[in-house]
Amino acid sequence: MQNKIIKKNIKKSAGFTLVETLVAIMIFTASVLALMVVLSNSLSNANFTKRKLTATFLAQEGVEYMRNMRDTYVLYLPPSPPSGYNGWDNFIVKISECNKVLGKSCYFDNTTINFADQTQPIIDMPIFLCPSQICPELKYIAGEYNYDVSGINSGFVRKMEISKVANSVGDDEIEIISTVYYTTPSGLKNISLKENLFNWIQ
């Protein structure tokens, strides 16, 4: 009789009940789902950070190209320093399609620059008006962003603008604004960098 009672107790305490099994599965599933959400958010944040960083670099590149062009016109083109003033005027004419005051914006195409040319190739870089303030999308090819038609759409659009700085003497100071628009899962974002350029050889 005692052996029967012991066997009966062993049967009652052995293994999981169906309810316990279901609860364990639910807890495990919830843990896996929570982990997947965390990983998904981490990947999304990493992608957003990468695109924002790329947009910042592209905006900075726009400013650098304009500064390089200013330096080339002012320092190296006739008439040579110390006069240099005509070089500044020529630079202003070159970037006239970017005049924000007149409701204009522009983009430049560096794919045409021949860097083997030793006669200041930056001045050969064309600057185009953005029709209705809408600039073309940059292409991505071989680690570079430009307007090469063989590239793929990058999701980045760069717009360049210039405006005369208030209270500056004559036209000897301008503000360069480089804005890059980029797409993210949450919508369109943009980043703008500004820099003042001077006619520092007069």
Image (cartoon, rainbow, N blue to C red):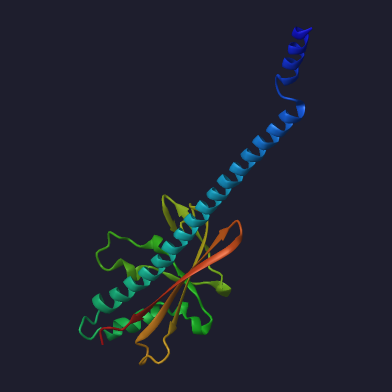
Q: Is any atom of residue 120 visible in this view?
A: yes
Is 88 situated left or right of 4 in this image?
A: left
Q: Is any atom of residue 153 visible in this view?
A: no
Q: Considering only vertical position in the picture, is 130 above or below 202?
A: above
Q: Considering only vertical position in the picture, is 184 above or below 169?
A: above
Q: In which quadrant of the rendered image does the N terminus lie? A: top right
Q: Considering only vertical position in the picture, is 184 above or below 164?
A: above
Residue nearest the viewer, comparing 6 with 125? 6
The structure residue drawn at horizontal position 55% and vertical position 74%, both measured from the top left corner, is 133
x and y, in percent, of residue 24 in the image: 68, 32
Quarter-of-image position of residue 57:
bottom left
The structure residue drawn at horizontal position 32% and vertical position 76%, both measured from the top left corner, is 70
The structure residue drawn at horizontal position 24% and vertical position 80%, both measured from the top left corner, is 78
The structure residue drawn at horizontal position 45% and vertical position 51%, both measured from the top left corner, is 141
Which residue in the rendered view is the most extreme toward the right?
Answer: 1
x and y, in percent, of residue 3 in the image: 74, 7
Residue nearest the viewer, comparing 127 with 21? 21
Residue nearest the viewer, comparing 156 with 99? 156
x and y, in percent, of residue 102 in the image: 51, 84
Q: In which quadrant of the rendered image does the C terminus lie? A: bottom left
Quarter-of-image position of residue 176:
bottom left
Quarter-of-image position of residue 118:
bottom left
Is 10 situated left or right of 129 in this image?
A: right
Which residue in the rendered view is the most extreme toward the front?
Answer: 2
x and y, in percent, of residue 45 in the image: 53, 53
Q: How many marks?
A: 0
